[in-house]
Image (cartoon, rainbow, N blue to C red):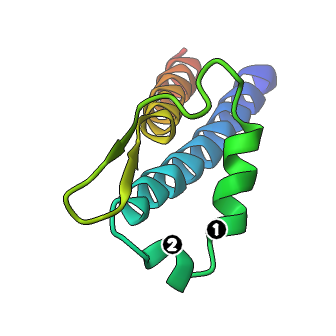
Amino acid sequence: MQARSAGAVALTIISWAARAAALAMAAITVILCVSGLTARLNMVGAIVDLTRALPEIIAGYGVITTPFGGIFRLDFALIAVELFVLDYACQRGAHALRAR
């Protein structure tokens, strides 16, 4: 019984971390769509580091210019979606462990 409870707590913690990271990636994706906003917020170094942290297969994939003068990074958006899916899966797993 305690193992299930501990597993549910661990999955909940992973879920919260994935959700926070997904929200951050989604916010960064939106910020990049506006021209100059990244430079004003001093995020250029963080964006370069995030791009380097991505796997080479996806890094730089789907960079599209926006009408606002910025860029839409499909790779960042895909990572955000994957993190939201991980969040959902962990929440479902934690719920299933608690229901037993």
- Residue for point 34% across, 41% down: 64
N-terminal of the pair, mark 1 or mark 2, is 2
Q: Residues within 10 Å of mark 2 (few under 14, many from 20)?
A: some
The residue singled out by tag 1 in the image is 44
Return the x and y of residue 67 as percentages of the image width and height: 19, 58
Q: Quadrant of residue 58?
A: top right
Quadrant containing the N terminus is: top right
Left or right: 66, with 70 as reference point: left
Residue 78 or residue 49, whichever sits in front:
49
- Residue for point 42% across, 31% down: 62
Return the x and y of residue 93 as percentages of the image width and height: 55, 20
- Residue for point 55% across, 78% down: 39
Quadrant containing the C terminus is: top right
Q: Are marks 1 and 2 in contact (CB under 8 Å)?
A: yes
Residue 28 or residue 13, whichever sits in front:
28
Residue type at the position of mark 2: Thr
Return the x and y of residue 69 as percentages of the image width and height: 30, 64
Tell me the SS state at disc 1. helix
Distance Cα–Cα, label 1 vs label 2? 6 Å
Instruction: Reply above or below: 7 against 76.
Output: above
Instruction: Reply above or below: 51 against 24.
Output: above
The residue singled out by tag 2 in the image is 38
Instruction: Reply above or below: 24 against 55.
Output: below
Q: Quadrant of residue 68?
A: bottom left
